[in-house]
Image (cartoon, rainbow, N blue to C red):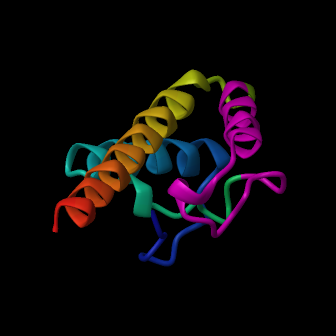
Amino acid sequence: MHDSDGKQPQSALEVWDAFIDELDRRGQAGSAADVFVPSMLHPDAPSGRRFSQLSRVEIDTLATIGARLGRRGDIIKDIWTHTQQKIKAQARANRRAADEG
């Protein structure tokens, strides 16, 4: 997601697409929760925060930003919902293991 070749900075649309691509790739690998919101996305974006730590309000803000960029903002909501479900399921499994142990 970083511009490492010294050329012009990425547009907000390019940053959004790279962010969604990274969420998708990392989500398929089981780690979308650890993706950070890029700082160059938008002034209202919760930049620098881990995806798993975002609130529903912050996700709605990201969805709005995506829609304004001409992208489907609901994608970010779907990825976040799946990530939150996975985190909660893991927490339940950890509690069960602790109770049994």
Most distant residue in the left direction: 101
Q: Nearer the viewer, residue 17 or 53?
A: 53
**60 in the magenta segment:** yes
Q: Tell me residue 24's x, y (percent).
A: 34, 41
x, y (%) of residue 90? Answer: 31, 52
* Numbered marks: total: 0
Which residue lies most toward the right here?
44
In the image, taking residue 88 as reference, residue 71 lies left or right, namely right
Q: Does any portion of residue 72 appear in the rendered image?
A: no
Residue 79 placed where, x, y %?
44, 35
Residue found at x 64% / y 51%? 11
Q: Is residue 40 above or below residue 19?
A: below
Q: Please check the rendered image and state whether residue 41 is part of the magenta-colored stretch, yes or no.
A: no
Q: Based on the displayed image, in which of its 4 quarters is residue 58 positioned?
A: top right
- The magenta stretch is 42-67
Q: Is residue 63 above or below residue 41?
A: above
Q: Which residue is drawn at the image coordinates 49% and 50% (left, top)?
A: 19
Q: Is residue 37 left or right of residue 79?
A: right
Residue at coordinates 73% horizontally, 58% vertically from top-left?
46
Q: Tell me which residue sits at (83%, 52%) in the image.
A: 44
Give the x, y percent position of residue 66.
65, 33
Quarter occupied by the C terminus: bottom left
Q: Relative to 69, does residue 24 appear above or below in the rendering?
A: below
Residue 85 relative to residue 68: left or right: left
Q: Quadrant of the N terminus?
A: bottom left
